[in-house]
């Protein structure tokens, strides 16, 4: 998975799940570990890292759509 794909998936996860996006990505990581799916694990680790980076660098917003 490319860095751009990870960032696109991360943005989609944030739009769909808001502040829960990070937790959902961690759930997917745990599922992939349990299944011994190394490709899936790598993908979700990249998505999780992208979500964390987007939340870290996002400008402060007001309201429930905030990434912080």
Image (spheres, rainbow, N blue to C red):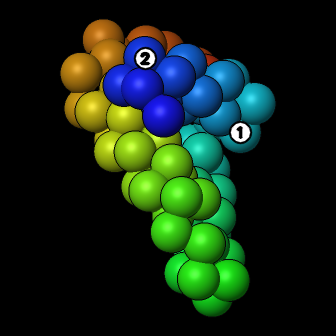
Q: Residues within 10 Å of mark 1 (few under 14, many from 20)?
A: some
Can you tell which mark lies on residue 4? 2
Q: Position of residue 44 (x, y in %)?
A: 52, 53
User: Which quadrant holds residue 59?
Assistant: top left
Q: Residue at x 60, y 45 (%)?
A: 21
User: Which quadrant holds residue 51?
Assistant: top left
| Residue projecting furthest to the bottom | 34
State which quarter of the image contains the C terminus: top left
Looking at the image, do the residues carrying marks 2 and 1 touch, with CB atoms under 8 Å apart?
no
Q: CA distance from mark 2 to mark 1?
A: 20 Å
Q: Residue at x 59, y 59 (%)?
A: 40
What is the tally of numbered marks visible in this picture? 2
Say what secondary structure mark 2 lies in.
Answer: helix
Q: Residues within 10 Å of mark 2 (few under 14, many from 20)?
A: few
Q: Position of residue 32 (x, y in %)?
A: 61, 73
Q: Position of residue 36 (x, y in %)?
A: 59, 83
Left/right of residue 55 with respect to residue 31 in the rendered view: left
Mark in the foreground, 2 or 1: 2
> Can residue 51 be seen?
no
Say what secondary structure mark 1 lies in.
Answer: helix
> Can residue 61 be seen?
yes
Q: Nearer the viewer, residue 60 or 23?
A: 23
Left/right of residue 63 with respect to residue 4 in the rendered view: right
Determine whether 58 is above or below 14 in the image.
Answer: above
Residue ID for mark 1: 17
Left/right of residue 62 with respect to residue 63 in the rendered view: left
Determine whether 24 is above or below 38 in the image.
Answer: above
Q: Position of residue 39 (x, y in %)?
A: 54, 58
Q: Residue at x 59, y 28 (%)?
A: 9
Left/right of residue 10 with respect to residue 20 in the rendered view: left
């Amino acid at each position: 998975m490319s860095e751009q794909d990870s960032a696109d998936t991360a943005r989609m996860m944030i739009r769909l799940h808001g502040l829960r996006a990070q937790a959902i990505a961690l759930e997917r990581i745990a599922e992939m570990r349990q299944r011994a799916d190394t490709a899936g694990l790598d993908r979700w680790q990249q998505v999780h890292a992208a979500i964390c980076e987007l939340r870290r660098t996002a400008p402060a917003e007001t309201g429930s759509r905030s990434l912080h």
